[in-house]
């Protein structure tokens, strides 16, 4: 049976992170599940968690006038959902909806931010990893905008 410790250690996001930092993160972690069609997070709401997707698919969406929800990216097992918990004002910058049954590990943002304040090296390691994710999401959004307005 997998434990939270082994799941975090095997997840690509935590790959290469010192074991002591992984152990700190485990103290903020819990298992969650989302049914197909269920919103996991909504634009503008408080960003209280981020998620390590273990199984399933999640659509990242933005609202576009005259178009409604526009899917900008699909996340799958092995990916991270949510970076807004790390940067004030800690509000979601997009919607995320489970496309199919999705199982994930939720990491409590307040818990993890407190640990980062206590250990700035942990905070720096997480920030480097999230900077990469933020860059990916911005690129996906840029490509979506080009697709919408490029023709």
Image: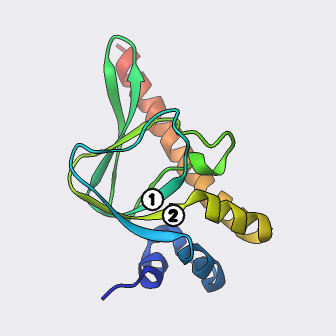
Quadrant of the drawing holding the C terminus = top left
In the picture, residue 122 is in which quadrant?
Answer: bottom right
Looking at the image, residue 139 sits to the left or right of residue 117; the answer is left
Which residue carries the number 2 mark?
107
Q: Relative to the observer, which residue lies in front, 75 or 25?
A: 25
Instruction: Indicate whether 22 appears above or below 97.
Output: below
**Image coordinates for residue 76, horizontal then vertical, percent:** 32, 56
Say whether marks 2 and 1 touch (CB < 8 Å).
yes
Measuring 59% from the left and 55% from the top, which residue is drawn there? 130
> Is 127 placed above or below 40 here?
below
Left or right of 14, for residue 32: left
The disc, 2 or 1, on the residue closer to the chain's N-terminal end is 1
Q: Residues within 10 Å of mark 2 (few under 14, many from 20)?
A: many
**Total numbered circles:** 2
Residue 26 image label: none
User: Is 39 displayed left or right of 136 in the figure?
Assistant: left
* Residue marked by disc 1: 51
Residue 132 rendering spot, x and y as whole percentages: 58, 53
Q: Where is residue 95 shown, x and y percent of the image?
A: 41, 37
Residue at the image position 27 percent from the left and 45 percent from the top: 38
Question: What is the secondary structure assignment of the residue under circle 2?
Answer: strand
Query: What is the x, y in percent for residue 16?
Result: 58, 78
């Amino acid at each position: 049976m997998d434990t939270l410790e082994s799941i975090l250690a095997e997840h690509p996001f935590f790959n290469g992170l010192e074991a002591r930092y992984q152990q700190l993160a485990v103290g903020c972690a819990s298992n969650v599940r989302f049914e197909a069609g269920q919103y996991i997070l909504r634009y503008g709401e408080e960003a209280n968690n981020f998620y390590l997707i273990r199984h399933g698919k999640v659509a990242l969406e933005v609202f576009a006038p005259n178009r409604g929800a526009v899917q900008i990216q699909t996340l799958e097992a092995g990916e991270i959902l949510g970076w807004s918990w790390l940067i004030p004002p800690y509000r979601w910058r997009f919607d995320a909806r489970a496309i199919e049954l999705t199982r994930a590990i939720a990491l409590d943002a307040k818990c993890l931010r407190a640990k980062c304040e206590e250990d700035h090296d942990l905070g720096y390691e997480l920030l480097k990893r999230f900077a990469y994710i933020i860059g990916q999401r911005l690129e996906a959004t840029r490509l979506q905008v080009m697709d919408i307005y490029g023709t």
